[in-house]
Amino acid sequence: MEQLKQLSLKKTIMLYLLIALTVSFFASAIIISTTQRIQDNVWLNYIDKDKYYDMVIQTEEEYGVQIKTPRPGSYVMSNIDYHISEACDFIETWTPLILTTLGAGLAVLIFYKNKLKVPIKILEEGSQEIARNNLDFQISYDLQDEMGRLCSSFEHMRGQLLINNKYLWKMIEEQKNLKAAITHDLRAPLAILKGYHEMLIEFIPQDKFDKERLSEIIVSCDKQTDRLTLFIDKMRQMSSLEDRNTEYEAIITAEFIKQLKTTAVILAGPKNIVINILEEPQEPLSFWADRALIYEVYENLVSNAVRYATRKIVISIVFINSILQIQVCDDGVGFQEDNIDLVTKAYYHDNPPDDMGHFGLGLYISKLLCEKHGGKVRIENDINTGASVKAEFNIRV
């Protein structure tokens, strides 16, 4: 029975029609045979039965042919027998056509009910939900015929639309954040530069600035210009992330860890931060990964840690099967618990006094790069230290 349900639409309609035509054929034969007997019994009332039977027996013995009952004239038969005979003629003539038509129509109705009604209703309801901009539903149809495959394709389309819709809303949200970031991060340096410009226009002609004060203004303007340049570079980096591909290469573990140590020491040097690197004693001798991508994430994490660390930064490097984990912990104030889920959002500033020092993009870029490498970023506050950021990368050992 299950195999019959899984038949294709073409085979199913052919099977239904074959059954309908077969039943119609036998039913027509039975009805025609019955009407012929009724008609013969009516006609026998108007002939000499003894003479007829003798002639039938003689003809069958000599020629092997059965003689049909002769049809009496309409003027001979009674009114009732005449109408009975005419009705039998009508039934004999039209029964095959009528039963075949009814059987074919019934077969089509059963075919529609069993194979088309449910999936069409499902697809219609799904189309109405999509028309209402509601993609949070699921198309489910058990049969694997053409309609089942159509429902599966529709469900795949719905899922893809949902993904595209979420991506579109994400892009819109990022555009809003970008506008807010531009307003936030460009307003301050532009306001400062404008203020200095107005001061210079007003006071230089009056010789009210000495060289020392003028030099301070020029240095401050240079810093604000550097900040604007850095912001533009970050924007350019953000726009190139979507097109960046992950390029795996063979990496010697010992050289890789040595490079990480050197990078951390260089980044922490200006603040005299102590770097403590913990590495797994049984790491693989080599592995395959995108070296540049991992270094970029690592530099972002260490730079953030250096910004907030007081005296020490602890870096842990662990290999777990096909996962590389790099955890960076500092002894600073840590993240605000209420906003810890927002730390990896673009343009997020956890420490308002530090807004002039960074743009809130480091952890967001790190998260995107980790996801491109099949991993993720985990944010938490370490019990013994301050902030803890763990970056995971999917590697090939």
Image (cartoon, rainbow, N blue to C red):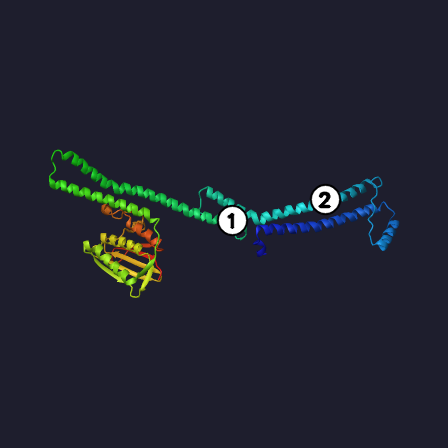
User: Is 234 displayed left or right of 38 in the figure?
Assistant: left
Does residue 137 appear in the picture of this structure?
no
Can residue 183 be seen from the camera position used here? yes
Amino acid type for the residue under numbered disc 1: Leu
Name which of mark 2 and mark 1 comes first in the sequence.
Answer: 2
Q: Name the residue under label 1.
A: 150
Residue 26: x percent and y percent?
71, 51
Query: Which residue does the image show at 61% across and 47% down from the upper left?
Result: 108
* Residue found 26% across the figure and 45% down from its top: 231
Residue drawn 28% across the image and 63% down it: 254
Which quarter of the figure is the N terminus placed in? bottom right
Q: Which of 128 and 10 is in front in this view?
A: 10
Classify residue 132 as left or right of residue 32. Answer: left
Residue shown at 14% from the left, 42% from the top: 215
Q: Which quadrant of the figure contains the C terminus?
A: bottom left
Question: 45 above or below 298?
Answer: above
Quarter assignment of residue 175: top left
Is residue 120 positioned above or below 326 on the image? above
The amino acid on which the numbered mark 2 sits, given as a three-letter code, is: Trp
| Crowd tier of the residue under label 1, counting other residues whose Cα lies within 10 Å: few below 14, some 14–19, many 20 or above | some
Regarding mark 1 in the picture, which secondary structure is present there? helix
Identify residue for label 2. 94
Q: How far apart are marks 2 and 1 (CA)?
A: 41 Å
Residue 141, x across and y down, in percent: 52, 51
Q: Residues within 10 Å of mark 2 (few under 14, many from 20)?
A: few
Image side of residue 239 versus residue 196, left or right:
right
Q: Position of residue 210 (x, y in %)?
A: 11, 39
